[in-house]
Each structure stands twice: as C-alpha cells, then as structure tokens.
Image: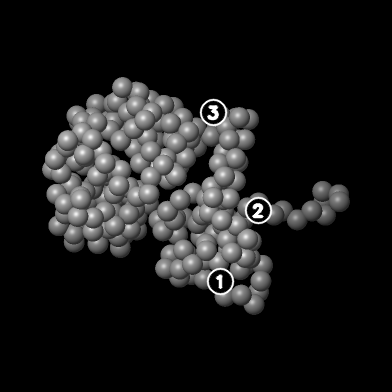
Amino acid sequence: MPTDHCHDKEDPPAWIFEKMRSIRPAIEVGWQIPVLLSVFLDQNANSGSHAMTASEIIENYEELVGRWLASHELQEQDMIDSFGKVRDDWIAEDLDSWLDINAFYEGMAESINHCRGDAVLVTTKQQRFAQALVRHAGVNESAMPDDSIFGLGMYKSKSDVIAEKMKEGDYQADQTYFFEDRWPTLAKCLKDERLEGVRFYLCSWGYCTEHEVELAKNEPRVQVLRLADFAGVVR
C-alpha cells in the first residue's frame, strides 16, 4: 500500500503502557506481563467485553492469568521457558541494550559492594539473567557471589531462602535484613514463624502502591525505606 494511504498507528498503543504501569505493582513474575497484555488487547478488540479497571485487574489478576493459560492450553513453565527464550535471543543479538534497559537504581551497586554482611538476591528473574544484570551494574562477585543469587525456579518462597540462609550462617533474626518492594510478598513473610524478629523493609521506590506503603507504615515490624536511605542501612 502506498505510504500516503497508511494510517499512523502506535505500535504498541500508548494506552496499553499506561494500563500496565497502573497494575505493575500487583504482578509477581515477568512472564505474567505478556499474558495480561494479551488480555488487555482482547478486551479492547471486543467492543462487547467489559474493559476492567486497574483496581479490578489488580484484585483479579491471578484469576485472569490462570484463565488465559487454560484457554491457550499452556502451563506456567511454558510461559517461563518462552519468556526466557525471548530474553536469550535478545541478549544474543544485542546484550548491551538489554542490560541498559534494566539498569540498577543509582548507588545500589555501591551499597551492595560495601554491605556489612552477606548479600543475597532472591528474584523472580531467572538466575542467568539476574547474574548478568548484577555484574553489569558493578556488583562485585566478592560482595555477592553467583551462588548467592536465587532466580526463578530455584526456590519455593522467599521465606524459605531467608530461613535457610539464617540456618546456614547461624544468623540471629535481628542480624537478618529483608528488603522487598512488593507488599504481598512482605506480608507473607510476616506470617512465617521462622522469620520472627527479622528486620523487614518495604522499598517504597519499587513496585508498591501508595495504599501498600500506608499498610506497611501501620505494621510495627516493617520499616518503610526510601532509596536515599538504603545505603545507610546496609553499609
């Protein structure tokens, strides 16, 4: 088709970015993002379908993801593998651009390098991606060895990793600091009796809503942390 007859279309459209930003704090693992993007596009394409609000999506996103997987006859592992392959292909083609868009917050790597204790990373990214990002950010292997980076599929829950590391290192609870930016994850850890006395921090610059920050402020065992204060706690 001649260019003068083409419509100027956004690809992807701006509205989908706005919708993703509004619900991102509720999403636990990265592979769920393309699933929800598909749900959004289906709702937008079907004029008879109710376009859910951000709050409705946050409240029901696990059900939406489960329903999408079932309708496409897929399992979580299928999505994990597919998501990982896309990353692998991108990294193989242009490693620098992938690393650059996943930059660490300013001062984070330096703080980890000067951490007073043993630094452990527990992430929903697959380990090989997390390791690449950590090294690219400038975190030294002496400060955070590769085997201290726990990626997706390597643990059942973050609580388990914390409890196991406390046992391995013979750390007392009040010597253990847990920094988390997702309130639902932090709330689960608070219920784990093995973590009684652990110092919990909600990282307010991450994937948490204003409402969740207020919930954390009302929880005596949790301290809400600003990015500017992180170095002062760990160094």
Element marked by disc 3:
helix
Task: From the viewer's perspective, tell me whether residue 164 is left or right of residue 25.
Answer: left
Mark 2 or mark 1: which is in front?
1
The foreground one among 2 and 223 is 223
The x and y percentages for residue 141 are: 35, 23
Mark 2 or mark 3: which is in front?
3
| Amino acid bearing label 1 | Ala
Cβ–Cβ under 8 Å for marks 3 and 1: no
Image vertical order of residue 195 relative to residue 23, above or below: above
| Amino acid bearing label 2 | Glu
Colouring rule applied to residues: one colour
Task: Give the spatial CA distance, label 2 vs label 1.
Answer: 20 Å
Q: Is residue 120 visible?
A: yes
The x and y percentages for residue 59 are: 42, 68
Q: Residue at x 25, y 38 (%)?
A: 165
Name the residue tied to disc 3: 96
Q: Earlier in the sequence, mark 3 or mark 1?
A: 1
Q: Which mark is residue 137?
A: none
Name the residue tied to disc 1: 51
Q: Is residue 15 visible?
A: no
Task: Give the spatial CA distance, label 2 vs label 3.
Answer: 26 Å
Q: Residue at x 23, y 35 (%)?
A: 168
Q: Residue at x 43, y 31 (%)?
A: 131
Q: Residue at x 28, y 33 (%)?
A: 119
Q: Earlier in the sequence, mark 2 or mark 1?
A: 2
Task: From the viewer's perspective, tell me whether residue 103 is left or right of residue 211.
Answer: right
Name the residue tied to disc 2: 10
